[in-house]
Image (cartoon, helix red, strand yellow):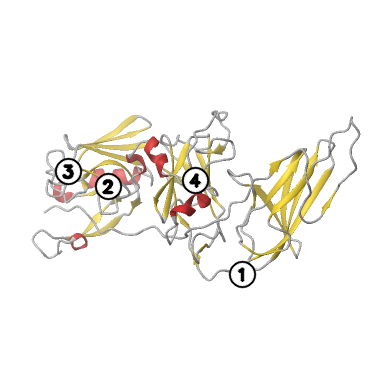
């Protein structure tokens, strides 16, 4: 008897939906017409030899605005400034620094603001003469929404991942198509050293980010998603910001050739081991395609009834399987299969999984990281898009078509060793 597919499991938690207000950028101007709220540092017209004073006007939010989302943005018009600083201050004097938006130029709080709380936004500009001018706008954030969608990521903070690992953000409700761009513009992935990459909406509830090529071993990665309190469609608001840092491990790749029934395992381009395998038999073929290791367990129960074959039937099974590594949501794995050792390297007898000997399966399981690539070739069918983390199963040119924001490749390469947002056309954009 041979065994293959296990039950599909939903291991990804979720969150979020649609709708964000995008404000105009903090744009420079030569002749400011005025400012919102109060300001200091204004002066008479300078002498011809003196540099012009810096000017600033807050254009949004309006001074005195109420019911402002906790994931708010500040837009301002700046003139003759050599430096701009933004800070948000509550009634108790607590300050939250402002950070520039990754692509639009507006300013956001460095962390989510409190609900139902008065704040003052202070924008301070410094001119070439060293003098400062500050514009302020008072506002109050909205009450805590009744419908908060849970935002989750797949990569754990501090995790070491394989070279094929995408950053994945899950939303518990669908993000409407016409709202995805506003949400995506608040997302960034910074890689050190810098590498080009892009976002792709796998579904309304899930967005991925992958590099153009596999991540370079040793890359430091940081995901920043300042979306806590962001209106994301209908009654829903994102429940929190999401920030995650990770490190890319060595380049470890598994390639399965169905014609020869062999798996070749390489690390940093060097062959470590060649393992005989048995893939899915003709009635239940394994899928060809580019996969990555999604989930690893020391053992799992494999039950044929989860895909329509009663476990007590002649063709059914329910078995404790060791060293399983999931490739697809519909149940294709790499795993130990002592019952098919005599077939491995010769013929396909599984229900769709890639069978390995107990020794090879254990060895492989102990080498791999989540995100390590697995490439399967020349089987009777091809994996369907999104059946697993299939980010690498299409070209990068096709991948960027799944972005809600028109993709622009970086204009110039960043200096080697410097950190900048991946997939960016400028040092601060990665949407």
- Mark 2 = which residue? 384
User: Of 271 and 326, which appears nearest the observer?
Assistant: 326
Q: Residues within 10 Å of mark 4 (few under 14, many from 20)?
A: many
Q: Helix, strand, or loop for circle 4?
A: strand
Q: Are marks 2 and 3 in contact (CB under 8 Å)?
A: no
Which mark, residue 278? 3
155 over 64 or under it: above or below: above
Could you give the CA–CA distance between mark 2 and mark 1, rounded to whole angstroms? 43 Å
Q: Nearer the viewer, mark 4 or mark 1?
A: 1
Which mark, residue 143? 1
Going from N to C along the chain, the mark reached first, 2 or 3, is 3
Q: In the rendering, at what x and y percent does residue 98 appear?
A: 68, 51
Q: Residue at x 75, y 49 (%)?
A: 57
Q: In the rendering, at what x and y percent does residue 321 appear?
A: 23, 55
Q: Are marks 2 and 1 in contact (CB under 8 Å)?
A: no
Quadrant for the N terminus in the image: bottom left
- Mark 4 = which residue? 246
């Amino acid at each position: 008897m041979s065994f293959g597919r296990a039950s599909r499991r939903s291991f990804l938690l979720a969150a979020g939906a649609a709708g964000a207000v995008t404000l105009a950028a903090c744009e420079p101007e030569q002749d400011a017409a005025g400012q919102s709220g109060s300001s200091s540092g204004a002066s008479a017209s300078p002498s011809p030899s003196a540099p012009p004073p810096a000017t600033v006007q807050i254009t949004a939010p309006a001074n005195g605005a109420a019911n402002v989302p906790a994931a708010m943005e500040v837009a301002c018009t700046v003139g003759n400034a050599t430096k701009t600083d933004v800070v948000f201050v509550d009634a108790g004097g607590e300050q939250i620094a402002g950070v520039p938006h990754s692509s639009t130029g507006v300013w956001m709080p460095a962390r989510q603001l409190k609900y139902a709380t008065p704040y003052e936004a202070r924008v301070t500009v410094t001119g070439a003469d060293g003098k400062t001018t500050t514009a302020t706008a008072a506002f109050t954030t909205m009450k805590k929404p009744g419908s908060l969608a849970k935002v989750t990521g797949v990569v754990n903070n501090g995790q070491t991942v394989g070279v094929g690992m995408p950053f994945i953000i899950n939303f518990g409700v669908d993000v409407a198509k016409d709202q995805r761009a506003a949400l995506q513009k608040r997302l960034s992935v910074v890689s050190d050293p810098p590498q080009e990459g892009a976002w792709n909406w796998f579904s309304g509830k899930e967005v991925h980010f992958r590099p153009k090529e596999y991540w370079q071993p040793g890359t430091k990665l940081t995901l920043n998603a300042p979306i806590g309190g962001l209106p994301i469609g209908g009654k829903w608001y994102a429940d929190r910001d999401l920030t995650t840092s990770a490190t890319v491990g060595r380049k470890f790749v598994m390639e399965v050739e169905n014609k020869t029934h062999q798996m070749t395992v390489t690390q940093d381009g060097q062959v470590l081991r060649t393992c005989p395998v048995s893939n899915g038999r003709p009635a239940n073929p394994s899928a060809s395609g580019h996969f990555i290791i999604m989930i690893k367990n020391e053992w799992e129960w494999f039950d044929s009834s989860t895909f329509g074959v009663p476990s007590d039937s002649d063709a059914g099974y329910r078995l404790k399987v060791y060293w399983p590594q999931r490739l697809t949501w519909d149940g294709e794995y790499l795993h130990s299969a002592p019952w098919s050792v005599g077939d491995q390297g010769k013929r396909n007898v599984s229900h769709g999984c890639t069978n390995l000997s107990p020794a090879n399966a254990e060895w492989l399981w102990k080498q791999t990281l989540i995100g390590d690539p697995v490439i399967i070739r020349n089987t009777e069918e091809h994996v369907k898009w999104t059946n697993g983390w299939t980010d690498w199963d299409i070209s990068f040119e096709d991948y960027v078509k799944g972005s809600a924001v028109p993709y622009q490749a970086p204009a110039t390469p960043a200096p080697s060793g410097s950190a900048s947002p991946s997939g960016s056309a400028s040092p601060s954009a990665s949407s």
